[in-house]
Amino acid sequence: MTVSKAAPINAAKASRPARKEPAAAAVESTALQLGELSEHLGYALKRAQLKIFEDFLRCVAPLQLTPAQFSVLMLLDKNPGRNQTEIANTLGILRPNFVAMLDGLESRDLCARIRSTNDRRSHILVLTDKGRAVLARAKKLVAAKHEARLNELLGPANRAALLAMLATIAKEF
Amino acid sequence: MTVSKAAPINAAKASRPARKEPAAAAVESTALQLGELSEHLGYALKRAQLKIFEDFLRCVAPLQLTPAQFSVLMLLDKNPGRNQTEIANTLGILRPNFVAMLDGLESRDLCARIRSTNDRRSHILVLTDKGRAVLARAKKLVAAKHEARLNELLGPANRAALLAMLATIAKEF
DNA sequence: TATTGTTATACTCTATAACTATA
DNA sequence: TATAGTTATAGAGTATAACAATA
């Protein structure tokens, strides 16, 4: 799945054929049929997820935060005093992969590793003041641009229902 | 992949932790709080998508098909006579990346490239007999194991509503 | 011995430029 | 010149093994 800004998806909408063309040489580059594929939840889920992440990146572009980085900052804010393993596990990030991610956030002074006094093996993670400020701005951007647009597209009730079903799948499937 | 099994205990109250003075070495490895993160559609969407793909792979494991490969076979079946660019674009796969993918399917004799007589630059893609057979088996497995389980979890009406909303997001967001 | 953070590594996905052969 | 398929390549994301420091 690519869908970058460079690659316009062919036949995205095209619900009606342009009738201005005289049907001289029947050009048969009709839009392709998804067929049963459009009934498969996994396919729809993946395409929707790509769109959502794409829009998230656009909305929060001034702050240069990826969805994954945003989720880390959110979790640190809500769960002070936790170590790398706990944060990583909660987000489904493998500990080895979390190292480089934290390096990135720490080098930008958004969070800090603090050696625990209880267990000197572990690093307690804390948001810096700048981290808290950036997170606050990010939350505003996401709420005002991203989630608001979703609300507009689906309506509040549908959006809530969608969220609930996705959470159910993530938890119980 | 890791998909933590950490079930977030939804506190939803107690803004004040009434700590009960734990006697000795208080092991307070409480579950972490997702907080507002659980209200973000992107987060829920990504977690759900991982679960769905994971289950898809399990269900169709006997046939060794990934979701992406399945989507290609489905599209070839529904759209005979199309070339690589058309199939790849429809699925959001970049043409260069589609080459290796087709090599894999073709080497397993699931599909074939046929040089077009009209335009000798392009390759018409066709399912082989074996490709049709594998696709038929895959569709059965997915319907009987994967989608059925989803139906059981959400209920048919909810599943349909979920699918519709995801399609809306994919198309119009 | 077990665990935390870390390094190294590998494999998949995704993205872009450029080549070839056709048109 | 432009397009279809391809190659090469680079960057993310994800996965496992193993090591040093600490428990």
Image: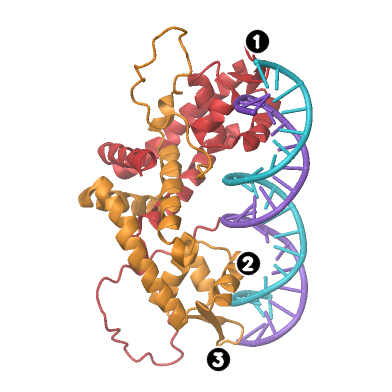
Chain colours: A orange, B red, C cyan, D purple
Q: Which of marks 1 and 3 is in front?
A: 1
What's the distance in space between the residues labelled 3 and 2, CA to CA?
Answer: 23 Å
Q: Measured from the top left, where is residue B30 in percent x and y?
A: 41, 76
Q: Which residue is drawn at 51% across and 66% down?
A: A89
Q: Is mark 1 on a helix, strand or loop?
A: loop
Q: Picture quarter containing residue A46?
A: top left
In this view, the residue in front, B50 or D10, is D10
Vertical placement of B20 versus B41: above or below? below
Q: Given the image, what chain letter belongs to the residue carrying mark 3?
A: A
Considering only vertical position in the picture, is B130 above or below C7? above
Look at the numbered disc 3 and give the secondary structure of its residue: loop
Find residue A117 and name its label.
3
> Residue under circle 2?
A96
The three-letter code of the residue at mark 1 reads Thr
- Determine if marks 1 and 2 fall on one subunit: no
Per the image, the residue denoted by label 1 is B117
Mark positioned earlier in the residue sequence (3 or 2): 2
Residue B146: x and y in percent read 44, 37
Quick check: B152 left or right of C20?
left
User: Which picture quadrant has residue A120?
Assistant: bottom right
Q: Residue at (43%, 56%) from the top-left corner?
A: A58
The quarter of the picture where residue B2 lies is bottom right
